[in-house]
Every structure is written in structure tokens, then in C-alpha cells.
Image (spheres, rainbow, N blue to C red):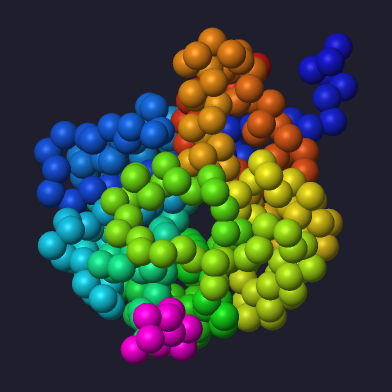
């Protein structure tokens, strides 16, 4: 009876799998702070993409992890056509074609030796406009590699418009933009920084949003839509369900939410201690995000949950 009258339904197609691919490894590398998640080799990434597709998951969001020696101040590995992310996009495209939506992180933080999402000026501050030039180039090489959706995540002012223009310039009008519209300066990113081998020095408070603010997110939303965003996202998900709900009721474009590494790690850690029921907690958190208005949920449990939903285990 409860299932029949449920107001919110979770489906495999609602889910997107974030995945990390690391350059120069021959075996997957477990991420200590994210039990069950690994840095993939190129081969295991292909397998993960097929597994996600077979589970009914709609998309895969790729993050590249270059060798440390290739990091520099400008993050040039991020715009190298032979850089790890571009190679990974081509690998996954060759494996699954257009049957799985291939998405890519469009940001410099994995590729810079200082770990920030942009290039720095002479005073060590992130230079917004100089960074936009790098994002434009990054969008083009990712599109040339065959990506379906780019996700500019650096929170630079004007990034969506610059990326849209860059894509249109090379005839890639069909590549969509998932705007990281409300990306908060959160304590819950910690495990992710291990996952991407971050070299971050300092913090990102000057360009990520203040957790105390909602109206600021709505201004960012209006700007992203004006600049041509095809989809918008709130990140993190769980601590910002009020923001997610407000965004979802305010727009007529698809809305995504990212259940980030810290949210994942807390559930896994508590379940490992026997303090909570793991499966129930996973489905409850995802249902809450879906109920708040997310049509798409990026979650590290995407394939597992998709398999269980497809098997009728929920």
C-alpha cells in the first residue's frame, strides 16, 4: 500500500555516477575515505561505464586525475587533447556510444599545482577572467573528445556564457551545459580531495558560496540561465535541500543535485560501525533529494542503487 501511494519515486534513470580515472596506474586504487570507490584505470573505467549502463543509470560524470609531474600553475594537462580526462572521454564513448550520457568535470583544480579552480594572479588570488579563457579551451577539447555534457564547476563569474560561446564557436551546439549553480564552500568535500589527489593550498571561500546564503544562490541561478545553462545543479545535496527545493520550483530546466563525498562517507562509516542500516539510509537520503526537486542525482551509489531498483529490491 505504501509503495502504491508513494508521492516520490526513485528510478535508475534519475541517477548519474561520478567516476575518477587516474593516469599511470595499472590497478584501481581504493579511496580510503570513500569505501567502495576507486580511482579507475582506463580499462576499469570502461567496465564501470558498462555496468552503470546495464543498471539503468542515465549518465556518468568523469573526473581526471593526472600524474603529479604534469600539474602546473595553469593546469595545462586539463586542456591537453591527450590529457587523462580527454582520453577517458574517448574511451567511454568508444565503449558505450550514446547509450550513456557522458559528462565531464570542467575545472582546473585537478590539474593545477596549487589546487585552485583557476589560474592565480601575482598576489596569489584566483584571476576570474584569466580562468575563463582556460575554461573556454577546456570546453572545446572535451567536446572534441566526444562528451555529451560539460559541467563547469569552478564557480567563476560568467563561466556558463564563456563555455557556451566556446562550444558554439567550434560547432558543438549540441553539447549541453550542466551549470554548478549553487556550489557551497562545504566541509563535506574532504574525501573528494583525496579522490582527485588535490594539491589545494588554502581554501575556496573567495569563489564558492557561503553556506549561510540562499538569495545569493538565486542570483547565481538567474545569471546561469541568462548565460545559456541547459541544466542547473545544487552541491552538496543533503545539507542544502531547502536551496534545492527553491531552485526546483523556480525554473523550467532540469535540476540536478550532487550527493558529495562527505555525504557518502558519513553513511558508509556509520553503517560500518553498525550504527545505521546502510541500505535504508542510502535510499532515504536519495529519496529526500528527489523529493526536494532533483530530477538527476549524482551519487557514488548510482550503479548499486540502479541494480537494486531494477531487481525490484525497493
The residue depicted at 54 percent of the width and 21 percent of the height is 270
Q: Position of residue 18 (x, y in %)?
A: 44, 45
Q: Residue 151 vs residue 231: left or right?
A: left
Q: Residue 3 vs residue 64: left or right?
A: right
Residue range of the region highlighted in magenta in the rendering: 122-134
Q: Quadrant of residue 167?
A: bottom left
The residue depicted at 26 percent of the width and 40 percent of the height is 40
* Residue 166 visible here: no
Q: Is residue 132 part of the magenta span, yes or no?
A: yes
6 over 300 or under it: above or below: above
28 over 248 or under it: above or below: above
* Residue 30 visible here: yes
Q: Residue 169 vs residue 229: left or right?
A: left
Q: Quadrant of residue 7?
A: top right
95 over 159 or under it: above or below: above
Q: Position of residue 312 (x, y in %)?
A: 61, 15
Q: Position of residue 258 (x, y in %)?
A: 57, 48
Q: Is residue 274 part of the magenta span, yes or no?
A: no
Amino acid at each position: 500500500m505504501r509503495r502504491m501511494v508513494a508521492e516520490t519515486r526513485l528510478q535508475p534513470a534519475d541517477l548519474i555516477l561520478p567516476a575518477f580515472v587516474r593516469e599511470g596506474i595499472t590497478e584501481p586504487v581504493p579511496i580510503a575515505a570513500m569505501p567502495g570507490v576507486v580511482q579507475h584505470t582506463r580499462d576499469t573505467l570502461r567496465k564501470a561505464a558498462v555496468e552503470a549502463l546495464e543498471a539503468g543509470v542515465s549518465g556518468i560524470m568523469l573526473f581526471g586525475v593526472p600524474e603529479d609531474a604534469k600539474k602546473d600553475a595553469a593546469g595545462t594537462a586539463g586542456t591537453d587533447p591527450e590529457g587523462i580526462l580527454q582520453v577517458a572521454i574517448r574511451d567511454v564513448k568508444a565503449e558505450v556510444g550514446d547509450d550513456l550520457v557522458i559528462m565531464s568535470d570542467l575545472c582546473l583544480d585537478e590539474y593545477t599545482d596549487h589546487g585552485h579552480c583557476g589560474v592565480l594572479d601575482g598576489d596569489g588570488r584566483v584571476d576570474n577572467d584569466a580562468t575563463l579563457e582556460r575554461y573556454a579551451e577546456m570546453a572545446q577539447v572535451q567536446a572534441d573528445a566526444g562528451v555529451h555534457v560539460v559541467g563547469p564547476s569552478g564557480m567563476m563569474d560568467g563561466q556558463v556564457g564563456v563555455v557556451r560561446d566556446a562550444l558554439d564557436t567550434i560547432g558543438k551546439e549540441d553539447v549541453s551545459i550542466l551549470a554548478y549553480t549553487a556550489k557551497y564552500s562545504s566541509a563535506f568535500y574532504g574525501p573528494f580531495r583525496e579522490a582527485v589527489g588535490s594539491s589545494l593550498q588554502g581554501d575556496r571561500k573567495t569563489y564558492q558560496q557561503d553556506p549561510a546564503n540562499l538569495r545569493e544562490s538565486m542570483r547565481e541561478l538567474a545569471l546561469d540561465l541568462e548565460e545559456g545553462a541547459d541544466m542547473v545543479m545544487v552541491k552538496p545535496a543533503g545539507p542544502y535541500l531547502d536551496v534545492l527545493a527553491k531552485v526546483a520550483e523556480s525554473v523550467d530546466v532540469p535540476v540536478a543535485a550532487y550527493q558529495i563525498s562527505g555525504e557518502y562517507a558519513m553513511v558508509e562509516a556509520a553503517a560500518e560501525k553498525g550504527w545505521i542500516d546502510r541500505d535504508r539510509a542510502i535510499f532515504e537520503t536519495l529519496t529526500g533529494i528527489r523529493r526536494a526537486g532533483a530530477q538527476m542525482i549524482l551519487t557514488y551509489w548510482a550503479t548499486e542503487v540502479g541494480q537494486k531498483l531494477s531487481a525490484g529490491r525497493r
